[in-house]
Image (spheres, rainbow, N blue to C red):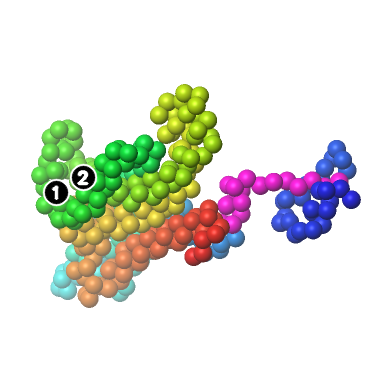
């Protein structure tokens, strides 16, 4: 019996690990990469897979909604006053928020706008803000974490003090206090005529400016271990530049924590956008976002509860699914962890 045969006979291998060896007539063990093993673990987690497909559906809605609105398939800005009862404060005439074949999720009280159309466009706006802020957060935090962890010394100390200072800043108060002035500055110096773009850009910048310290600390801790590895020493000995070591040697080894952090930061920023809209910061109506739709629906939580629960459940579902997806990715990429 050969060594390969004895290894196969002595342990149970999952399907796909045993392949026919045409040259020797026997069986050979086919190794799996860490990525393949992580994908296998992720696919076995049913809850994570369900969350993954729901997140994919939300992204498809975000991409398709502007196109559907452009071609007139639905309208998130049209008023349908004939569907409202003026004598009852502008509430929908029909029960359950005015649900009908033309308006599957009913119409808004007071305006008569189609709720489904506005929710789909609101998902586009909210995901655009959340993705932009998350990418900036991870990029800035990862770069500073790599520089601080690899350089050490005074560079590490300076970055650490900046992190402490940023974490101690009252970010919510800064957002509220500077919103009006900062938006005007953005419009003036960046020559942005659309106030919605200026308000959205302001939210993105502030979320990223106060959200990078945690990822910076995580990346720094990883780099402190990576910089002692043989491939880093080899790159240093052959005279590789700092930029090459940062982005060609260290960064590719950080994709797992960065991917997990991305999936966990996204729902936090979606919730933050909704909370900021409730406080009056962010994109203003009539342009829909998940935040301003939910903020408007709060006024009708008693008189038209269906209109309140639809955007609330939509927001809750996307946040929960992103969190479950992040947990599943973390468990798949780190098999030693437990949920």
Residue 202, disc: 2
Residue 238, visible in the rendered structure: yes
Write down the quadrant of residue 142 in the picture. top left
Residue situated in front as seen by the camera: 163 or 94: 163
Residue 40 magenta-drawn? yes
Give me the residue at 56% from left, 62% from top: 45
Residue situated in front as seen by the camera: 214 or 109: 214
Residue 111, visible in the rendered structure: no
Q: Could you tell me residue 338's position as x and y percent?
A: 51, 64
**171 left or right of 34?**
left
Give the mark, 2 or 1, whose residue is nearer the N terminus: 1
Q: Could you tell me residue 229's position as x and y percent?
A: 51, 39
- Whether tag 2 and tag 1 are in contact, CB under 8 A, the answer is yes
Q: Could you tell me residue 62's position as x and y percent?
A: 38, 49
**24 left or right of 188?**
right
Tell me where the magenta segment starts and ends, as one range: 26-43
**125 left or right of 49?**
left
Identify the element where label 1 is drawn.
helix
Q: Which residue is mark 1?
A: 179
Identify the element where label 2 is drawn.
helix
Residue occupying the far top of the picture: 239
């Amino acid at each position: 019996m050969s060594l390969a045969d004895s290894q196969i006979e002595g342990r149970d291998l999952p399907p796909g690990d045993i392949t026919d060896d045409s040259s020797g007539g026997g069986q050979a063990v086919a190794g799996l990469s860490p990525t393949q093993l992580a994908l296998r673990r992720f696919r076995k987690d049913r809850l994570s897979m369900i969350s993954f497909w729901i997140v994919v559906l939300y992204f498809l809605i975000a991409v398709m909604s502007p196109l559907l609105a452009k071609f007139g398939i639905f309208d998130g800005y049209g008023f349908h006053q004939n569907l409202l009862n003026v004598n009852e404060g502008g509430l929908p005439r029909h029960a359950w928020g005015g649900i009908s074949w033309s308006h599957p999720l009913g119409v808004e009280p007071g305006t008569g706008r189609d709720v489904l159309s506005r929710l789909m466009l609101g998902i586009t706006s909210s995901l655009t803000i959340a993705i932009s802020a998350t990418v900036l957060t991870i990029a800035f935090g990862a770069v500073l974490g790599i520089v601080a962890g690899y350089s050490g010394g005074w560079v590490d100390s300076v970055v650490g003090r900046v992190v402490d200072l940023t974490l101690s800043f009252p970010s919510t108060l800064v957002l509220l206090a500077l919103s009006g002035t900062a938006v005007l500055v953005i419009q003036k110096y960046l020559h942005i005529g659309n106030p919605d773009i200026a308000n959205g850009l302001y939210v993105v910048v502030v979320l990223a400016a106060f959200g990078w310290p945690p990822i910076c600390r995580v990346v720094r801790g990883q780099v402190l271990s990576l910089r002692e590895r043989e491939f880093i020493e080899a790159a240093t000995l052959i005279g590789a530049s700092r930029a090459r070591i940062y982005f060609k040697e260290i960064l590719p080894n950080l994709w797992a924590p960065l991917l997990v952090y991305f999936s966990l930061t996204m729902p936090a920023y979606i919730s933050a956008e909704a909370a900021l809209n409730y406080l009056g910061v962010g994109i203003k109506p009539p342009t829909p976002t998940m935040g301003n739709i939910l903020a408007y629906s709060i006024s009708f939580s008693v008189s038209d509860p269906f209109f309140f629960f639809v955007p609330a459940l939509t927001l809750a579902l996307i946040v929960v699914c992103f969190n479950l997806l992040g947990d599943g990715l973390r468990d798949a990429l780190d098999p030693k962890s437990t949920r």
